[in-house]
Image (cartoon, grey):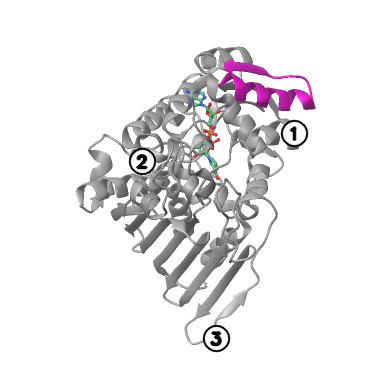
């Protein structure tokens, strides 16, 4: 299969290596496209070093790339607010699409994608790597077995620490019109997991959210009143626990600091800025078509990183806790929790709780990324009893909870999904798990 990638930032590397190297015998990378010449050149050099060179294209030459290189599939790894443009253009040019999450960030863009998909019949794969984390696949396995009976309710909390969490407040993610806020950008993973675990989709959503930590008052409280617009030139950087040292981190320096002249993309804006438009503290309550309900919390400034989830069922409870040690993006990593750990507890009514052996794997995102890449790019892997592959339908349902939650935060109302979609002329098929 022939692939082209649009968006040569940090995330595209995983796909580039999979297509050009790990699964390079079965696939080929035929083109790279980006708005930034510098990042394009770094990526092209990495491919060329392994083989026969690669054609690169500026953003305005995207159509030219499709016409000249004729990829079967376009991989979309640009910032979230641009996904729909490339997804739609690629499908209209006859290509299939593989896109990073979130598929898109609001209902107008979602409609553009759904319309183009219906007209062209092309496939869209949304790369939900979290489904492939072995421990999360194990939860699906247990739930599928019916061990806890009918799943009636879910309590789910996701904790982002002050290293990983802060990174969403430094660049495009921090603007709601560019990322949809964390309830779309980040929680798309979490809501996708819940949809997939439950085998259902939400019918109504209510939410609260606010920016409680990443704001000027917190900087003042930390004694950081002399702040610059970015860490690189900030007079208080040495005293700031949340600083990102672009200069001192070689990959970040190469990819972003040294590329700034091309497009003015600043990677280390101050996380305490007043112009941030996303929330850092969010709670969502959702009702599902199968009768289950979800309580969900996302906190972006926790002292630790990880997740806790509990499924309540008619026969018992299934609980999972994952303490993650995430990639270091800057700031001061809180090491107090030691190393990565996962626990899964099955507690059936009338029995002692059982600590299960947690399914494990190596690699990023709790061992998810390598498993997912095999399923995406290894043609010999065709079946998956867990149904982890995700289409535009999963992509759409996964963002709808967050989009509806954003509307609920704004209006204070419970959002009923069906009329919410119908008002915009959107019809979304129910996913059959
Ligand atoms: N699944 C995951 O775990 C995961 C992890 C990280 C990022 N992501 C997703 O991957 C995507 C990329 O994230 P990233 O961290 O690499 O971002 P990034 O900002 O590092 O990279 C984006 C790239 O797109 C380029 N770009 C910007 N505007 C463009 C345009 N108009 N045309 C072409 N190229 C353009 C930028 O120059 C940059 O090279 C996002 O959608 C993000 O949500 C997913």
Up-down: is 280 above or below 274?
Answer: below
Identify the residue under disc 3.
Answer: 352
Instruction: First in sequence, mark 2 or 3: give its number.
Output: 2
Identify the residue under disc 1.
Answer: 21
Q: Position of residue 415 (x, y in %)?
A: 25, 50
Q: Position of residue 324 (x, y in %)?
A: 58, 59
Up-down: is 174 above or below 413?
Answer: above
Identify the residue under disc 2.
Answer: 276
Q: Position of residue 413 (x, y in %)?
A: 20, 52
Task: Say if the magenta span includes residue 50.
Answer: yes
Q: Is residue 387 left or right of residue 271?
A: right
Q: Residues within 10 Å of mark 3 (few under 14, many from 20)?
A: few
Instruction: First in sequence, mark 2 or 1: give its number.
Output: 1
Along the line of sight, which residue is nearer the eye, 12 or 129?
12
Report the span colored magenta. Answer: 36-57
Instruction: Please tell me which residue is depicted at 35% across the width and 35% down the height of the picture.
Output: 177
Query: Does mark 3 have its CB less than 8 Å from ligand 1?
Result: no
Instruction: First in sequence, mark 3 or 1: give its number.
Output: 1
Residue 95, by quadrant, is: top right
Whether residue 387 is visible, yes or no, is no
In space, the residues marked 3 and 1 are separated at their CA atoms by 48 Å
Instruction: Please tell me which residue is depicted at 50% across the width and 18% down the height of the picture.
Output: 93
Along the line of sight, which residue is nearer the eye, 86 or 421?
86
Residue contact at pointers 3 and 1, CB within 8 angstroms: no
Residue contact at pointers 2 and 3, CB within 8 angstroms: no
Query: Does mark 2 have its CB less than 8 Å from ligand 1?
Result: no
């Amino acid at each position: 299969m022939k692939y082209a990638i649009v968006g040569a930032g940090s995330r595209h590397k995983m796909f580039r290596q999979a297509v050009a190297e790990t699964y390079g015998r079965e696939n080929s990378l035929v083109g790279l496209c980006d708005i930034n010449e510098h990042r394009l050149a770094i990526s092209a050099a990495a491919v060329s070093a392994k083989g026969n060179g690669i054609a690169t294209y500026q953003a305005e030459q995207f159509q030219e790339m499709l016409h000249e290189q004729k990829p079967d599939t376009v991989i979309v790894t640009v910032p979230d607010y641009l996904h729909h443009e490339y997804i739609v253009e690629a499908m209209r040019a006859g290509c299939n699409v593989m896109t990073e999450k979130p598929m898109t960030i609001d209902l107008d863009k979602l409609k553009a994608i759904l319309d183009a998909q219906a007209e062209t019949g092309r496939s869209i794969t949304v790369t939900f790597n979290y489904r492939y984390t072995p421990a999360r696949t194990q939860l699906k396995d247990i739930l599928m077995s019916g061990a806890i009976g009918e799943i009636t309710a879910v309590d789910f909390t996701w904790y982002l620490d002050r290293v990983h969490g802060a990174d969403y407040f430094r660049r495009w993610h921090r603007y709601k019109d560019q990322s949809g806020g964390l309830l779309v950008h980040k929680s798309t993973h979490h809501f996708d997991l819940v949809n997939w675990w439950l085998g259902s989709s939400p019918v109504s959503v209510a939410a609260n959210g606010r920016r409680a930590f990443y704001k000027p008052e917190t900087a003042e409280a930390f004694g950081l009143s002399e702040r610059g617009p970015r860490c690189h030139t900030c007079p208080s950087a040495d005293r700031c626990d949340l600083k990102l040292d672009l200069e001192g981190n070689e990959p970040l320096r190469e990819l972003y600091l040294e590329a700034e002249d091309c497009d003015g993309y600043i990677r280390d804006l101050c996380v305490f800025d007043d112009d941030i438009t996303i929330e850092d503290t969010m709670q969502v309550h959702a009702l599902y078509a199968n009768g289950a309900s979800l309580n969900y919390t996302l906190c972006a400034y926790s002292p630790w990183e990880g997740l806790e989830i509990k499924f309540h069922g008619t026969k018992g409870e299934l609980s999972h806790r994952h303490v993650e040690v995430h990639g270091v993006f800057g700031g001061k990593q809180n090491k107090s929790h030691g190393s990565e750990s996962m626990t899964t507890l099955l507690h059936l009514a009338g029995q002692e709780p059982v600590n299960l052996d947690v399914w494990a794997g190596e690699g990023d995102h709790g061992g998810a990324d390598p498993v997912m890449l095999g399923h995406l790019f290894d043609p010999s892997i065709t079946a998956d009893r867990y149904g982890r592959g995700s289409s535009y339908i999963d992509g759409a349902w996964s963002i709808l909870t967050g989009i509806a939650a954003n509307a609920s935060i704004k209006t204070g109302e419970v959002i009923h999904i069906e009329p919410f979609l119908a008002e915009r002329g959107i019809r979304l098929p129910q996913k059959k798990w």
